[in-house]
Amino acid sequence: MPNPFKQAAVPLDVDDILDISFKRAFKKLKPRKSKGDKLLIYKAREISRIQVISDTLTSRLNKVVKKFPNIDKLDSFYRELLDVLASINRIRHSLGAIQWASKLVKRLSRIYIIRIRKSNDLDLMVQLRKEALGRISSVIKRVSPEINFLREVIPTLRDLPDLDTEVTAVIIAGMPNTGKSTLLSRLTTQVPEIAPYPFTTKGLIIGHGELNGEKIQFIDTPGLLDRPLFKRNRIELQAIVALKYLRGIVLYIFDPTEICGYSIREQASLLEDLKNSLKQFIIAIVNKADLEREYRENFEKVSDYLRRRNMKFIKISAEEGMGLPMLKKFLSYNLKEEVE
Ligand SMILES: Nc1nc2c(ncn2[C@@H]2O[C@H](COP(=O)(O)OP(=O)(O)O)[C@@H](O)[C@H]2O)c(=O)[nH]1
Ligand SMILES: [Mg+2]
């Protein structure tokens, strides 16, 4: 399922909602041939004013509640993101408050319509209508903090990346310049999409590919899984943690040459962090194998480390394509083991 918040409706600002409803209710109607009882004509007019305002407001408010996806049915990935960005409790509270306001508006309008219907006094009818609209407006104004909150968070939620949580994900992690983008482009067919993602300006990079006829999405996470996790704030960590709910595996890229600018020790330390925070199976990729001859010792160091840690790994050159057919086989085998 793609981003479940795509269809969510952003409420209008309280003043605008009221404005629209009042304008609609008070727009000049063509003067009807005022045959018949003047009292009945006035009565009908006041009743319709209340009715129009109530209908306009409730339909606007209900739309916001109805178009918001069912929180209990969200996939864990999007649920976690909702919690990071908005706090699930707060969202529930806001939607509840809006629903409450909508019901109360409806109830008030019914009560006043009945009272106007029973009245036989022109002034009283006008007075009742004014009172009704005053009370209705104040109900709406009372939920203005909730409406403003939703106005703020819904656009962010609508902007979340479209990740099909049913499609197997291969998340590519590793320090900068280790070869993640190069590998992603090798494993995918089209130009990858860049999807905005909370707390990283670089977004998620999503590439589509196939392994053994099965659709796979390859995900690069610049700014998230490419630097140490310590010193990150809670929210950033939660944005990272949301990734752990994607069904699939993680490829952790090593650059033993250290040309990337990070030592083997730093690269290993990030790997240890990720092992503790992600729940997917992690396969290590030892990249830049085209340079193995020049950096033999470093390659051995990395291999030794990975063997000691009992990790599955495979040596490739993303740039020159060496080891890629093997990597694909290795991937489909492990996806079968891990995902099914
Ligand atoms: N020699 C060699 N260089 C590579 C290999 N893979 C990537 N690179 C180079 O490493 C640099 C960083 O690669 P990139 O894919 O942008 O790394 P990212 O920052 O992890 O996405 C680029 O200059 C690549 O050309 C490889 O297998 N061998
Ligand atoms: Mg990159």
Image: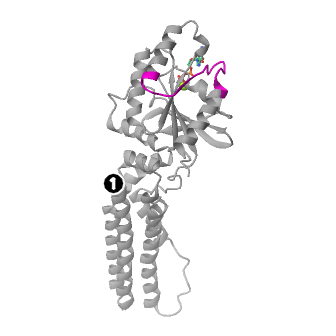
Specify the farthest residue to the top. 294
Residue 130 lies left or right of residue 330; in this view the side is left
Along the line of sight, the residue nearer the viewer: 2 or 52: 2
Along the line of sight, the residue nearer the viewer: 61 or 118: 61
The residue under the point 47% across, 68% down is 59
Residue 141 lies left or right of residue 299; in this view the side is left
The residue under the point 62% across, 34% down is 192
Task: Report the span colored magenta.
Answer: 306-325
Instruction: Indicate the quadrant where residue 127 lies.
Output: bottom left
- Magenta stretch, main secondary structure, is loop
Was residue 318 drawn as part of the magenta stretch in this picture? Answer: yes
Label 1 CB sits under 8 Å from any ligand 2 atom:
no
Residue 3 lies left or right of residue 320; in this view the side is left
Was residue 43 drawn as part of the magenta stretch in this picture? Answer: no
Along the line of sight, the residue nearer the viewer: 36 or 57: 57
Residue denoted by label 1:
90
Q: Is any part of residue 193 visible from this angle?
A: no
Residue 110 percent location from the top left of the image: 38, 81
Against 269, residue 71 (above or below) is below
Q: Amino acid at mark 1?
A: Arg
Specify the farthest residue to the bottom. 36
Residue 31 percent location from the top left of the image: 54, 80
Against 246, residue 116 (above or below) is below
The coloring applied to the image is: one colour
Residue 111 percent location from the top left of the image: 35, 82
Crowd around label 1: few <14 · some 14–19 · many ≥20 (10 Å): some
Dividing the image into four quarters, tell me where ligand 2 lies. Answer: top right
Quick one: SS at disc 1? helix
